[in-house]
Image: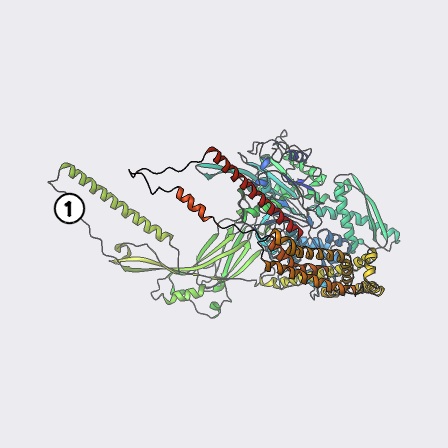
Amino acid sequence: GRLARLRVERHRRPSALLRCQVCISSVQAGCVAHNAQLRRTSLAPIAANQHPRVGIKRPQSSARAGTSMAALRLVALLAAAPLAGANVMGIDYGTEFMKVALVQPGAPLEIVTNSVSKRKSETVVAFVRGERLFASDAYGTLSRKPDQAYARLTEYLGRADAHPAVETLRAKSYFPTTARFNETRGALALGAPAGTTEGYGGDWDEWAPEELVAMILTYAKDITRAYGGNVVRDCVITVPAFATQLEREALVAAAELADLRVLSLVEANTAAALQFGLDRKYDEPRRVLIYNVGSESVQASVVEYSTFLEKAGAGKNKTVGQFEVLGKGWRTGAGGFHVDLALAELIADGFNEKWKTKKKGKAGDVRTLSRPMAKIRAAAKKTKEVLSANEKIPVNIPSLHDDIDFSMTVTRAELEAAAEGVLALATVPIDDALDAANLTVDDLHAVEIIGGGVRIPKVQQLLKDFFAAHRTNASDPLELGLHLNGDESPALGAAFHGANVSTSFRVRKVGMMDYSPFAVGVRMTNDLHAPSATEGGGLMGFFKGGTKKKDGADGDDPEAWYKRATLFKSGARLGAKPRTIAFHHDADIVCELAYDDVAKLPPGTPKTIALYNISGIAAFAQDMAKQNASGNLPRPKVQLSFVLDSSGVTSLAKAEVSVVEEYEVDAPPPKPVEVKPAADANATNSTNSSTDADADNATDADAAETADAAETAEAAEAEAPTENATEASNETAANETGTPGKILKKKTHKRTLTVIPSVAGLTQWAPRAGQMGEAKGRLAAIAAAEAERRAREGAKNDLEAAIYRVRNQLSDREDEIKPVSTEEQRDAITTASTELEEWLYDADAEPADTFVTKRKAFEESWDAIVSRAEELAARPKAIARFRDAVAVAKSNATELWPEERPWLAADDLADLVAKAEKAESWLDDVVKAQDALAAHDEPAFLVSELAAKLKPVAVLATRLALRKKPLPPKNETLASNETDSNSTDANATADGNATEPAEELSEEEAAAAAEKAEAEAAAAAEEAEKEAAEEEEMKDEL
């Protein structure tokens, strides 16, 4: 309830823009309708067809989202009772930008602003003079010192050096970053020039991509703490639809290095679809195409929205919205960055011509120079953005290279021609997504476009032409919907998904079903390096049954045994139930998880996902063989359970081996049949009928109890947990076992197997926990070095500020300082400030403690002079107040209080006089000593000491002033008379029953008594008021 309201909040930083919590868009040029209504009332309903952005009408639909739907859009999603301290981040980690959304108790979903109040941060990290830079600072360094900055790091995660994306960065992007394959880690490593490590005393020459991504994620955690006030560790991170398992696991490893707990990974389009469906409930299935043009790729997802009924208690049903991803498609190398590269090639050609002309044919190719190419890429990006709204723009790059200023004019047509090959891929993912969903354009109800690349006019035109050409009904065209914030919707959807996954929130239920586009299978062979295989010996003869032979292979050859199966087909639901495979085997095995259909994988993806050594099968078989003297035990049965979690990661979750032993036991004796006695023949009819009825009821009840007991026993045995050895409840008759008087029982022997991940024979694998220890230690050392640097810089700045402050005060407060200081003292202060200032220029390497020590010593000498000036100004008034207080205390104790407050003890008054005289004597001594000193000497006493010396006098005087007059003793005679007047007269009349009536007052006497009582009450009130006034006066005086 407290969250179910619309509001427009100003960001915590003054420079931030107003933010509309209804549509999550900036209130600068848009959201005029929402902003105007919300200024009038916080609960004003928004018309269903009025979209918050100016100039865009929201189409009417048959959805349940009616007239008041938007009024509860996002703020009311979080329940009123989240757990304390529960915060979740949604991180849309893109190739070029990162957006962070925050969900916390008592607040709506919000986009976190970074240290410069921007709502998105560049995913770049730079190293400059021992300092790490992030976001826009690092992006600026990318142009000035490209060899000390790292960008587009997601292109390196979980990939090899021969991956097409890595080749593009090397050959077409002209990035100076050196990528090489580290065979020890089974992953890429990025070159670390001396400029990136020397500030930390590092002796390493390469960075792991996970380290650099962890630094950026740590920055995301830091800005979230600065924005929300709490440290947030739980997060959900977005990934592209084509991210392979190795890439996903590498991103999770980077998050763990940043001390983040990844609740789940979610695809960017799926997160945007979740954000779109938060407040939309459709009676009929509605299919929407989410089209996303990012920096690296173009992605398309076909999503179907629908509703289902859920029991809400008290016989009521609640309508819950849900969506399902039906199909997805993508094309890498087709994003906005590749449009930038096409324009950069155009600019580079123009500069090469000018360079060649100016140098008379002795120029080279600017593409071989990293710094000029970094400037060209930055100019190309800015030019592309401007051409999205203009037909042409001049490009000016001063001092591009070799003291040559370059300028040219680029038109939108030239840009589109240069990027023709990239733009031609814009609609291919739509065809792939529709084919995967087995749908056509006619089956779509709406299209939503997101991503920075959709701002390119040519992309929008290609989309319109595509849908117009493939739409059968030309009167019902598909419009390009702009109902989502193209930059922030994935981050907001990820944050809401995190609130759903976290146990700390109770949110509105929104069903979400996504799938994996890649089929995963398993292959198993004998572990030929296991001790059970190398020590020799076989167990085949101890078990009944044989080994299934490989076609054309000998069954006795351990190398010939293998099994394979498809675990999760293409289109398998994420987070579905585990898939279990079972087979009979008696040797340790190696299990390989691999993609089944290599042709559908992104180029450069290794086939193998993971490798496991599963041991314990042979040992279990040996143990069972020792118990199998008869040779009737079956071969051990191995069960392997695999999961495809919500992050799209497949793994081996559980491995067990078991043997079911069958044995015969003596059958129990049959139960005797009980014969009930006949009814009494002499009983009356009514008695007989009653007895018969009772007997029938008893028989039915016994039968029911017997049946219930049997069912309960069967259910108990069926639901009983399986232990290492359990007896089965299946019993057969003696003639079924073949042995008279025997029944068959079963006992299950089960053991959990040991599973160890392996990399034997692999060239590339996911990061392991032990392998990231070095990176974690390096990050901790870097963080400690930066903390020390910040402390040093802070201490240095404080010293410099103290120098300038003292200099300014020395001149501004000259009239105050001159009387209490000598010229030598003032010259010493000036000399010390000059020497410290000169020392600061060469003290960059000094520790923080040195700066602190020098600042304190310098400030102490100056503060002593300032203190003397302040004492000189405050001393006369303080002494006068001290003497006045002592005089008042002595006067009260000797003159005023003995007469007005006679109940005060004489010893207390004498004590007050003694304390006052002692304080007065101390003051006379210190004043005499102070008069003997010069003004520039240290004072004989401080003004602050006067209060401490006067405190005993003030405490005693206050206690005496507040002491009230004691109450008079009780009038016992009056109480005795009142008792006698109400008692029975002892001398009653002769009849013994009469009593003497009480004497009644006359009217005059009663009036006089009332008047007297009123006067006494008035006098008592006046006395109390007087005492209160005296008490307040005494407090003020003291």
Residue of label 1? 677
x and y percentages locating residue 673 in the rendered image: 19, 50
Residue furthest toward the top? 475
The N terminus - image quarter? top right
Position above or below: 392 against 129? above
User: Can residue 162 be seen in the rendering of this structure?
Assistant: no
Report crowding for label 1: few under 14, some 14 to 19, many 20 or more residues within 10 A (C-alpha). few
Q: Position of residue 817 (x, y in %)?
A: 81, 59
Q: In the rendering, at what x and y percent does residue 187 appear?
A: 63, 60
Q: Toward the viewer: 160 or 219?
A: 219
Q: Is 184 located above or below residue 402 in the figure?
A: below
- Residue 205, visible in the rendered structure: yes
**Label 1 SS:** loop
Q: Is residue 127 left or right of residue 995?
A: right
Q: Amino acid at mark 1?
A: Pro
Q: Quadrant of residue 771?
A: bottom right
Counting from the top left corner in percent of width and height, residue 112 is at: 65, 47
Left or right: 970 in relation to 337? left
The answer to which of 890 and 110 lies nearer the viewer is 890
